[in-house]
Amino acid sequence: MAKGMSAPEVMIAAGASLTIFREAPPLEGAVAAALGAFACDNADAGAGLIREAMARLKDEGFGAVLGPMDGDTWGRHRLVIESDGRAPFMMEPQNPAHYVDAFAQSGLGIVSRYVSAVRPTDAAASGSAAPAGLRLREFDVARAEDELTRIHMLSLEAFAANHFYQPISRDDFLASYRPVLKAIDPELVLLAEDEAGELKAFLFALPNLVEGLRPKSVILKTYASRVKGGGSMLTNAFHARAQKRGFVEVIHALMHESNLSATHSSNTGSHVFRRYALWGGRL
């Protein structure tokens, strides 16, 4: 298997383009490449280019492909496959319907599904008991890189079991968050620390600024916890703060449909308004 560190490769054909990332998460134990930065004018052109990329990668010794995925799940990945017509939220993937048809016609199958849901800020809180000994505080924007470094370390641990997880370096993690630092509302980014000051849980949320300077919705982007009940404690505090700040709705963004966060979202009165999928297959 001739896989090594290599730069992404752009493939262009009549009416379609994609980028091959040869450092991708494995699929069912097989060494995989990712097909990202995908675009096509029509489904036939897109499916044809995907199949061409698959044939090339099979000749190189790869065992599987994933897509659309810009390298790994820290980058842009998945397509919208179902929507109730709600306007896109900030940082949400968007795509024409024929992109979905292209992947469906390529011979690949859906290997992972995701949802976004919305709930009123005044919906009932989770009944889970908060863990003892944790202190809740807000994100310190004056020490943003230090705060994000600690969040990075917890993320590597908390998300290790996620579908198609690959670790990300501290520098790449910081780079991914720098573009949104100006949008951060410290009262909506919460950290939970133990008595020794060790970070045990975090929640990262952003106002949905595509709605304007006074958005009615806020996006719960991600949360994670090292201790049982830490996530529920943070989400209960967050939803109460969001309501107090005047937000009407909370968007629970881009959850894997089998993750605990999706279950918690459903249990607290949310409504799924968008579904997404990631494709893959053996070569």
Image: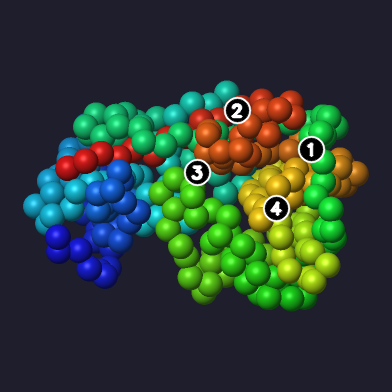
Q: Which mark is residue 273?
A: 2
Closest to the camera, between mark 1 and mark 2, is: 1
Up the image or down, 190 lies above or below 210; here it is: below
Visible in this render: residue 82? yes
> Disc number at residue 93?
3
Q: Residue drawn 74% across and 76% down?
A: 143
Q: Which mark is residue 227?
A: 4
Dot 2 falls on a residue whose secondary structure is strand
Q: Which quadrant of the rendered structure holds the C terminus?
A: top left
Question: Could you tell me how far apart the alpha carbons at marks 3 and 2 are, in whole angstroms?
Answer: 14 Å
- Along the polypeptide, which appears first: circle 4 or circle 3? 3
Q: Indicate the position of residue 103 as horizontal and vertical percent values.
A: 29, 34
Residue 238 is situated, as x and y percent measured from the top left of the image, at 80, 47
Q: Specify the amino acid type for callout 4.
A: Val
Q: Is residue 153 left or right of residue 229?
A: left
4 or 2: mark nearer the eye: 4
Measured as percent of width and height from the top left, residue 182 is found at 70, 64
Looking at the image, residue 31 sits to the left or right of residue 275; the answer is left
The answer to which of marks 4 and 2 sits earlier in the sequence is: 4
Q: CA distance from mark 4 to mark 3?
A: 31 Å
Q: Amino acid at mark 1?
A: Ser
**Secondary structure type for disc 3:** loop
What's the residue type where badge 3 is placed? Pro
Q: The residue tagged with tag 1: helix, strand or loop?
A: loop
Residue at 82% over, 46% down: 130
Q: Does residue 185 sit above or below 209 in this rendering?
A: below
